[in-house]
Image (tube, rainbow, N blue to C red):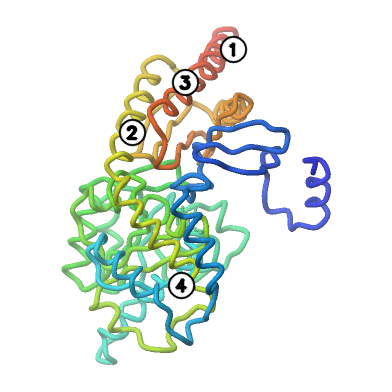
Amino acid sequence: MSLDSVMRSEHTFLVPTYDRHKILLKEGNGVYLEDYRGHRYLDFVSGIGVNALGYRHPVIHRKLKAQAGRLIHTSNLFFHEYQAELARRLAKISGLDRAFFCNSGTEAWEGALKFARAFARAQSQGRSKAKWRILALDNSFHGRTFGALATTGQAKYRDPFTPLVPGVTFIKFNDITDLNRQFDRSVCAICLETIQGEGGVWPVSPEFLRYACLLTKRTGALLILDEIQCGLGRTGRYFAYQHYRVRPDIVTVAKPLAAGLPLGAILTTNRVAKALHPGMHGSTFGGGPLACAVAIEFLRTLDGLMEHACEVGHYFRKQLDELQTKHSCIREVRGLGLMLGMELESAERAKTAVSQMLERGVLINRTNENTLRFLPPYIIRRRHVDQVVCTLDAVLSRLCTKASIGKETRE
Ligand SMILES: Cc1ncc(COP(=O)(O)O)c(C=O)c1O
């Protein structure tokens, strides 16, 4: 198998939506990936936050094999033993009551928006015009389907596909005055990522989130939090909103939920769920026995990993903060737990940093042009952090120096 032949074939047969790094991956083990040339990579991307338990985790591997041998898919026409158990566990850790299962982040988000509209209609009971407006945040990302795009506050994702779903207004990020200006009684939901991921790793401020929560509680609108990237242990708590002490009405999760199998979920309250009845929403694949059985094992394993993820996240953050004191091209370090971003002075430098890290055997990625993003598996150890920080230090030493020499010469 050669990278060249795969590239040629993809060039001919795939719709050209991806700009991939030139690595042909073969297998993974723990926190490492290996390519067909035998090169090993320390993985601090984890499939964009999916492989939270790394690769070939024994618990996941065992369950996958056992369940695949028994029952992979049933459709939602019948019961199987795992959906209710998985929903029970998600309710327990989220403080919400119920779950609906689907296959991806964007699908969870679509469903959440539908739930908000359905809830608003049920509340109005034909007495008045149902609330219908949705407030979303600038710079957000919620997925690639139409409802998700309509609430995604970044032109580059939206513009090629307009007109999108109507009824959405964007609020300036963390701007309470703007939220107040745009909010009225026609709003059925305020929806946001607790930590913006694709937008460059920006945690929402406690003041903004608590105020959004207050507005929704006061008026009967819903607070919908997208925890597809930041949820399920990524920040050192089960959910990022648990750092803020708010209770949302709907939460969406996906990425790491089934340890690499496609599975998403909408978590919500009994009050909202009452607005839904059979036939209003559904999915052929969502919540199948294989994905749910594996997700239960993921959650079981997560219980024993949270403290570790929190501790190693603090350690990593400290190291990145120290790098910032050393390199002038670092603008800011942001994030929580094991969802960390390092904003550099320019997109060009961030791009070069990612490719030089890759050449040195470390996978990270770049988000919102100039931010290096770190989403490692939760099983990383301090020595893995040290390796990444040491490599980054070397890469930035060359990049920042080059940049400042360039600047001086121009001056
Ligand atoms: C916050 C957030 N919401 C939604 C999505 C969409 O998820 P998916 O790609 O599984 O549809 C993503 C994906 O990166 C995300 O980060």
The residue wearing badge 3 is: 329
State the separation of the CA atoms marked 3 and 4. Answer: 45 Å
For disc 4, the neighbor class at 10 Å (few under 14, some 14 to 19, many from 20) is many
Q: Position of residue 142 (x, y in %)?
A: 46, 58
The residue wearing badge 1 is: 406
Q: Which mark is residue 287?
A: 4
- The response on whether ligand 1 sits within 8 Å of label 1 is no
Q: Earlier in the sequence, mark 3 or mark 4?
A: 4
The amino acid on which the numbered mark 4 sits, given as a three-letter code, is: Gly
Horizontal arrangement in the rendering, residue 314 relative to residue 154 (left or right): left
Residue visible at 25% across and 67% down in the picture: 96
The quadrant in which residue 29 appears is top right
The amino acid on which the numbered mark 2 sits, given as a three-letter code, is: Val
State the separation of the CA atoms marked 2 and 1. Answer: 37 Å
Residue 336 in view (yes/no): no
In the rendered view, would you say 91 is above or below 405? below
Q: Which mark is residue 312?
A: 2
Question: Mark 4: which secondary structure?
Answer: loop
Question: Mark 3: which secondary structure?
Answer: loop
Front-most of residues 290 and 168:
290
State the separation of the CA atoms marked 1 and 3. Answer: 13 Å
Horizontal arrangement in the rendering, residue 35 relative to residue 174 (left or right): right
For disc 3, the neighbor class at 10 Å (few under 14, some 14 to 19, many from 20) is many
Query: Could you tell me if the residues under marks 2 and 1 are in contact, i.e. CB atoms within 8 Å?
Result: no
The amino acid on which the numbered mark 3 sits, given as a three-letter code, is: Cys
State the separation of the CA atoms marked 4 and 1. Answer: 55 Å
Q: Earlier in the sequence, mark 2 or mark 1?
A: 2
State the separation of the CA atoms marked 2 and 4. Answer: 32 Å
Query: Could you tell me if the residues under marks 3 and 4 are in contact, i.e. CB atoms within 8 Å?
Result: no
